[in-house]
Image: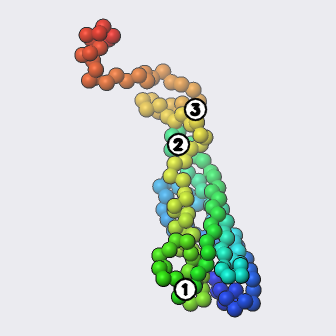
Amino acid sequence: MKIDMLPILKGEKKELAFDYPLTIEASFPSVVFPEPVRVLGTIRDMAGYIALALTVKIPYETVCDRCLLPIARTMELDFNKTVALEDTLENEDNDDYVIVRNRMLDLDKALQEAVVLSFPSKHLCKEDCKGLCMTCGKDLNEGSCDCVTKESNPMWDEIRKKLGNT
């Protein structure tokens, strides 16, 4: 979304509020975004600098990385930056600022980057999820299976024989 900053830059308004949907352009493995991401925010003239404060609510559906059960979550991201005019910065690669170019503030690029950096890399149905049995595939959250879980490293077999621990 592009916001016309002229009312704040001229001093006509001290605050601009907005609420808009954001389409996530990044692709996350096995993650589906069932509804638009909602962005709520304000831009405020703070007598000397301009502050941007956003809250992004990201509903998503995926599967647990351990047991493969479907899960639905909402990630909430707070995004706070200082707004700077393009001609006031020596180095425009500074991540501390969102830059106004030709009186317009483009929020989407900065938000897309923040979502990618903040999005969880691992998804669990619950913190202590036990996952699936590596042998039979049973969901270990529902109970244990009859599979042998102790695996022996064949490298130590000769030593075990000499010690009598076969």
Mark 3 in CB contact with mark 1 (< 8 angstroms)? no
Image coordinates for residue 137, horizontal then vertical, percent? 47, 33
Q: Which residue does the image show at 48% across and 79% down from the upper left?
A: 92
Type of amino acid under label 2: Leu
Distance, label 1 to label 2, CA atoms, is: 50 Å
Please tell me whether mark 1 or mark 2 is closer to you in this view.
Answer: 1
Q: Residue 148: percent from the left, percent from the top?
A: 43, 21
| Figure check: 3 above or below 118 | below
The N terminus lies in quadrant: bottom right
Question: Is 107 positioned to the left or the right of 8 in the image?
Answer: left
Callout in the foreground (3, 1): 1
Mark linked to residue 141: 3
The location of residue 93, given as percent across then percent down, is 47, 76
Left or right: where does residue 98 sit relative to residue 20? left
Q: Kindly give the residue lying farthest to the top in the view shown.
A: 164
Q: Is residue 45 above or below residue 147?
A: below
Give me the C-alpha separation between circle 3 and circle 1. Answer: 57 Å
Q: Residue at x 29, y 9 (%)?
A: 163
Q: Is residue 16 visible?
A: no
Q: Observer-nearest residue: 148 or 76?
A: 76
Query: Which of the two labelled residues, at mark 1 and mark 2, occupies the earlier sequence position?
Result: 2
Per the image, the residue denoted by label 2 is 68
Q: Residues within 10 Å of mark 2 (few under 14, many from 20)?
A: some
The earlier-in-sequence mark between 3 and 2 is 2
Q: Which mark is residue 20?
A: none
Q: What's the amino acid at mark 1?
A: Thr
Residue 136, compared with residue 124, is above or below; it is above
Label 1 sits on residue: 88
